[in-house]
Amino acid sequence: MRTTLAIVLLVTGVAAAPQSGGAIRGRVDVIQAAAPIQRRPGVTDLGAAPARGSVDRRRTVVYLESAPRGAFDDRVEHGRATMDQRAETFVPHVLAIMTGTTVEFPNNDRTYHNVFSLSKPKTFDLGRYATGKSKAVRFDRPGIVRVFCDIHSHMNAFILVFGHPYFATTDVDGKYRIPDVPSGSYTVAVWNEGVVRDSRRVSVPAGTDVEINFALDR
Amino acid sequence: MRPGPPARAGRPLRSYALVCAIVGLLAAPGRAQDLPSAPLSLGGGRVVLGTDIAVTVGERDEIGWFNYTDYEHNALRTLRLAVNGEWRIASPIALVGELRAENMSSIEPYALYLRVRPWRERAIDIQAGRIPPVFGAFGRRAYTNDNPLIGYPLAYQYLTALRADALPATADDLLRMRARGWQVNYPIGAPTFEPGVPLVTAFRWDTGVEVRAATGGLEVAGAVTAGTLSNPRVDNDGKQLQGRVTWKPLVGLVLGGSVARGEFVDDAAVTAAGADADRSFAQRALGADLEYSRGYGIVRAEFIWTEWDVPAVALPSIDRPLQANAGLIEGRYRIHPRLYLAARADWLGFSKVTGTLFDRQPVSWDAPVQRVEAGGGWYFRRNLVGRVTWQHNWRDGGRLRHKSFVAGQLLFWL
């Protein structure tokens, strides 16, 4: 809920007037990561859960809770992004995009998948499609979209759709960098596995990198 | 003869109302967001617990008994609570189980078995205990949401006039029980009125040992169990052999074939019939099934043939095995991310016997039944579905020859 609220603020909020840009960078240490969703106990399945790909550690998104004035002016994003399906896992597990982005969902697994979402910002169902095929969805509304597979209940992912470009997903080491932030004061929020886990106020001087590190505990 | 339904048939109405109210509140859009959405994971994922809660409300069926199961519950008026779990004891060993209670009655271990994978890199499992069925396709759909409709296929649910613990002495005894599978009574064996058996039960799992192996698109399974397809709790020393092969020639298409043979009649009934105690009175079955899915649709078909040996005791005798066959075809299509439609047509037929009844003409030993069911489901959220179905049954015998039912169901699972 707090996350949804925060992203709504991204659409409406206004901070200081932009001047020349700086950057916000740092590192997010997730001390205790959320456990991955387990498959339903397979009472009639053959064997235990098959080996899944290595856990995608790029699971945290850092973003500005309020965007600088003018952040939405003349910005129409027509970019493309990809959320792959491999070893019964969505890769990446967390995808942060801007409104207007089209996301491809290629099936690079050995079995059928059926990508769908019942989330309010984007409700869709791509149906079942086989290995080597891909289908795409365009995301036009900001918010959080939970993505699932209708066949494999443990497959899940998040797509965070922002109305501005001031966000970054952490890399495998937990590092992030939000470039081209106009000078001013902002609230920086850290989102991880469906929840805003921390937020801080920060002042970004013109042409300067500001470092903020976070340590997230459960 | 017991004139009316047993007390338990109408018992759960207040329970329905209570659970409907609770789940209904949970289903409201605001509250639904608070519902858990994933199985409970303990011990770093070594123990996983899920649940399956289905509240089904439909019309009573105490004349035709079309939808009663061998648990003596109406499949269209049932409260089902289940907890399923998997405990990965060590890398190759897991304990898998499901506890289930229907209509607030006793808790049954529907499944409880040890699963061992001897070779880590090979998809070969050995399962021992109360194991999943090997025979057929529908029986392996353990979870409520694996069934796109509320009713069950006739082959897996409809109660025939045959029992394992009581036997007809003559063909006339059998024909008198035609279309009365809900309350069957015969002169040999157990004297009580009890339900007959379905062709293959979807409501009880058998106890035994199963080996399953898969390679590429091929999967093979074989099992030795204590019961039979119709009656997993049969009271005799015989063993049942089951086998199944499934083949996936292309993504989305699954072809299956099954076979089973087991000792069907209880020892006490064989003795009461004066038959040779060493003689085999078996149930034999063959099955074939198909599943094809693509895009937003899925189609399934399944055919089952089975026969049961019964002793010939007196004239007019039952001098051949009693045979039955069943088929179903069903489809589901998702027309919106939250809405799907589904339909099923199935039938049940029986071989003929000749007695002194019915003008001494050959007559099917139980009344053939046909059923169509159609409906749809609305996903309030990924794991909370409301479903409504309409079902019509035709039967060539009995007090009630045809009857329609409407049922609603709220289903939640983790």
Image: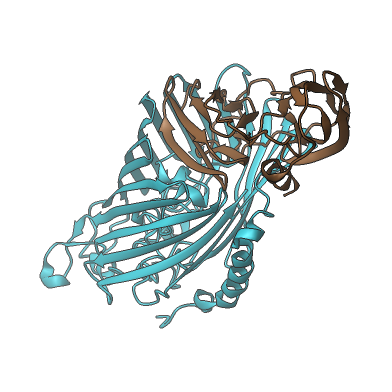
Asked if residue B191 can be seen in this view, the reply is yes
Residue B167 can be seen in this image: no
Q: Position of residue B97 (x, y in %)?
A: 64, 45
On the image, which quarter does residue B295 sit in?
top left
Left or right: residue B389 versus residue A207 is: left
Direction from residue A13 to residue A39 in the image, left or right: left
Residue at image x 77%, y 21%? A177
Q: Does residue A196 sit above or below B105 in this rendering?
A: above
Q: Which quadrant holds residue A143?
A: top right
Q: Nearer the viewer, residue A100 or B80?
A: A100
Which image quarter is the N terminus of chain B in? bottom left
Relative to B401, is B142 on the left or the right? right
Which residue is more in the foreground, B400 or B222?
B400
Q: Position of residue B397 (x, y in %)?
A: 23, 70
Residue positioned 57% across, 27% down in the render = A88
Q: Residue at 63%, 66% (x, y): give it.
A: B25
How many circles with numbers are drawn on the protein?
A: 0
Write down which chain is painted brown.
Answer: A
- Chain corresponding to cyan in the figure: B
Q: Does B73 sit left or right of B15 as displayed?
A: left
Task: Check the image and report above or below for A139 versus A83.
Answer: below
Compared to residue B57, the image places residue B2 above or below, namely below
Residue A125, image x, y percentages: 46, 40
Q: Nearer the viewer, residue A125 or B49?
A: A125
